[in-house]
Image (cartoon, rainbow, N blue to C red):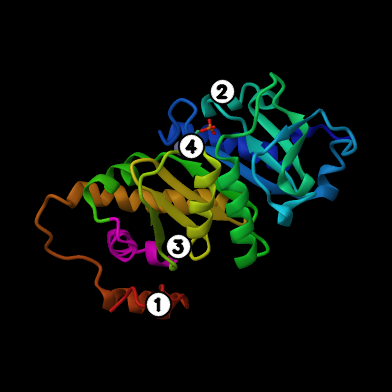
């Protein structure tokens, strides 16, 4: 067996959550990540017939039965992951139509996967329907996006258009825009459906007064989406209270569409 700590996804995830903490997006235990793993690759690192323990999920997700995920643990601090990946992370296989998750590696202190596990699993289902190559769901609490949800309209078109206007690259990086959820209690199964529903039409879902969910084919894409939206929110907060002399116009964005062969969300540009 190969050394699991050398597995690409673990190496990359440890680097990413360390970086997220450094960005200030994940205070305390804030944020969580799940990565869909390739079973045949995982079999080179773990005996997949050895289940350490079975953890009830409290929901059903038959679509994901048999699929394996690398996940962050609930209550774990991203700043600590690099020092003890096996305690702070886990690899689970979805079993019994999604009603349980079999722990195959990690969570060595007896811990459990993130409390946002339902939202992550439902979001994977939603994104995989849109893009069979989607593998990553990422949730965190970036300062500027969070702050923006206090002072900006939560209308999805208006929120998206403001972000697009803040940096040239935004419409290119997330042409489908961002969807927005109102404030809600976190970590409940019922709420799990809400981000997933919003994930059907966008890879970014801003959660008012809480943070953001991102989805992508790999960790770079997903981190990069959030990084770009967060930068736009930062620019917005720097200028929102000042008189604007110019901005990126809809005509400018149509030029970007043509030059880079992307299509902004239908009806979002004039
Ligand atoms: P967990 O520690 O359970 O992952 O929760 C963190 C969080 O960000 C909740 O929204
Ligand atoms: Zn959160």
- Classify 25 as above or below 225: above
Percent x, y of residue 186: 46, 38
Percent x, y of residue 119: 56, 46
Q: Is residue 145 visible?
A: yes
Left or right? Give the position of 259 relative to 146: right
Q: Residue at x 13, y 49 (%)?
A: 241
Which residue has dot 1 on it? 266
Left or right? Give the position of 170 relative to 82: left
- Looking at mark 2, is its residue's CB closer than 8 Å to ligand 1? no
Which residue has dot 3 on it? 173
**Mark 3 closeness class: few <14, some 14–19, many ≥20 residues within 10 Å:** some
Left or right? Give the position of 144 relative to 179: left
**Mark 1 closeness class: few <14, some 14–19, many ≥20 residues within 10 Å:** few
Which residue has dot 2 on it? 80
Q: In which quarter of the image is the C terminus?
A: bottom left
Which residue is most to the left? 243
- Looking at mark 3, is its residue's CB closer than 8 Å to ligand 2? no
Task: Give yes or no for residue 235 being in the magenta stretch.
Answer: no
Q: Residue at x 43, y 68 (%)?
A: 175
In the structure shown, which secondary structural element does the residue marked by tag 2 occupy?
helix
Q: How far apart are marks 4 and 3 (CA)?
A: 19 Å
Which residue has dot 4 on it? 20
Q: Distance between the residues labelled 3 and 1?
A: 16 Å
């Amino acid at each position: 067996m190969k050394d699991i700590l050398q597995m690409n996804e673990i190496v990359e995830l440890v680097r990413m959550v360390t970086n997220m903490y450094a960005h200030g997006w994940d205070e305390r235990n804030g944020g969580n990540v799940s990565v869909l793993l390739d079973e045949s690759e995982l079999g080179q690192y773990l005996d997949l017939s050895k289940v350490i323990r079975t953890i009830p999920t409290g929901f059903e997700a038959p679509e994901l039965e048999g699929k394996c995920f690398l996940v962050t643990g609930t209550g774990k601090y991203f700043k600590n992951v690099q020092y003890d990946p096996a305690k702070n992370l886990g690899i689970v296989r979805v079993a019994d139509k999604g009603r349980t998750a079999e722990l195959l590696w990690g969570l060595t202190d007896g811990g459990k996967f993130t409390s946002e596990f339902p939202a992550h699993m439902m979001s994977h289902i939603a994104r995989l329907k849109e893009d069979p190559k989607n593998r990553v769901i990422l949730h965190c609490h970036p300062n500027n996006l969070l702050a923006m949800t206090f002072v900006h309209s939560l209308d999805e078109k208006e929120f998206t258009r403001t972000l697009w206007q803040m940096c040239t690259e935004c419409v290119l990086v997330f042409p489908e825009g961002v969807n927005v959820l109102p404030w809600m209690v976190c970590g409940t199964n019922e709420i799990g459906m809400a981000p997933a529903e919003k994930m059907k039409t966008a890879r970014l879902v801003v959660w008012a007064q809480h943070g953001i969910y991102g989805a992508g084919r790999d960790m770079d894409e997903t981190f990069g989406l959030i990084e770009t939206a967060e930068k736009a929110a930062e620019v917005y907060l720097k200028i929102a209270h000042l008189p604007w002399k110019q901005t990126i116009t809809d005509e400018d964005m149509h030029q970007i569409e043509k030059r880079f062969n992307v299509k902004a969300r239908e009806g979002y540009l004039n």
